[in-house]
Image (tube, helix red, strand yellow):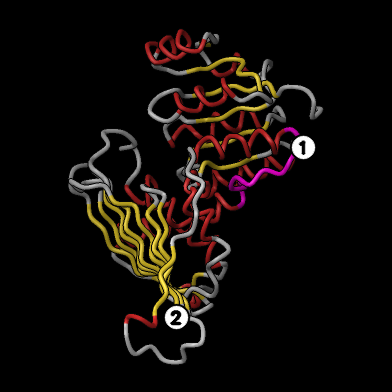
Amino acid sequence: MQNNSKLKIGVIGVGHLGKHHARILKELKNCELIGICDTNKKNAEKISEAYGIPAFETYEELLEKVEAVTIATPTVTHHDVAMKFLQKGIHTLVEKPLTPTLKEAEELLEASNKNKAILQVGYVERFNGAVLAVKDLIKEPKFIEVHRLSPFPERSTDIGVVLDVMIHDIDILLSLVRSKVTAIDAIGTNVITDKEDIANVRLKFASGCVANVTASRISYQTMRKIRIFSPNSYISVDYQKQDVVVYRKKEGVERITSIHDIERSVPRIRKTEPLLLELEAFVSACTGGEGRAASGEEGRNALELALEICRQIATGNSQNSSEKK
């Protein structure tokens, strides 16, 4: 499409997250929200009335009406819904995780390439103001500690905590470290659902970096933090508050002998709604601009690692990636 025309876009699934897709896309100036679809008729009617947009009974009705679509339906439906749009050459953003299986993810990538349709994945933490602020500050990370804890959500129980929330941190780690994972050691257990509700994984990278990641959806408190340790610096990021603190050895100090040898700084952060930035990036990519959202390939890579973590939790067998045949 031409840069001076509005992108015709639809939203499939307007539940917990999809309703915010509709809200934001309705307000963006360079796109036109053509309609929404949800299997829950009450949800669809509520959003339709709130934003004055048509609600369609089936997503197939949007196939001839839109140039792009965002999908925020249960994970098990992602493949079938996205495939219909990609086969029509319709640009598609799928909420994480891309699909429940690697095979399905690769089929979507193939359809995207074959039909020249953009495929992006909704890893919204990439657009967190704190993450954007520190990306250029991180050099040669050696150890990374991540905690993502939240109360039971009463949704997304078709998948476990790894595919539900830890996958955000997997995506961030892969984009920060940019090195092959050589060893994975994971543990987890189900507590409330029949999937893992709490999980921990220790990842080793070819660069020498080690990451320790904990995710839980049965916590009484909410915590979304990542701490990054590099030579001469320590960076603490609070995703929830969009806060960053950087600790460095003061310039000219050869050896730290007291707290006064350490410099503390708080980078200026542009606090905004990450989902807004993500959808702006998707629309930009669809209209010939530069979209920074996670590509389908990046979504597939995070999914592959997440599925291996799930396999280990289910079987109790750790894996050294360097020993793969």
Percent from the top left, x then y, of residue 289?
74, 40
Residue at x-position 37% and y-position 54%: 238
* Left or right of residue 99: residue 245: left
Is 90 part of what is drawn in magenta? no
| Disc 1: which residue | 288
Span shown in magenta: 287-297
Q: Earlier in the sequence, mark 1 or mark 2?
A: 2
Percent from the top left, x then y, of residue 34?
62, 15
Is 294 part of what is drawn in magenta? yes
Give above or below for 54 relative to 215: above
Percent from the top left, x then y, of residue 135?
55, 60
Front-lying residue, 14 or 40: 14
Give the amino acid type for the residue marked by disc 2 in the picture: Lys
Give the amino acid type for the residue marked by disc 1 in the picture: Gly
Front-lying residue, 74 or 237: 237
Give above or below for 175 relative to 35: below
Is residue 196 in sight in this rendering?
no
| Disc ID at residue 249 | 2
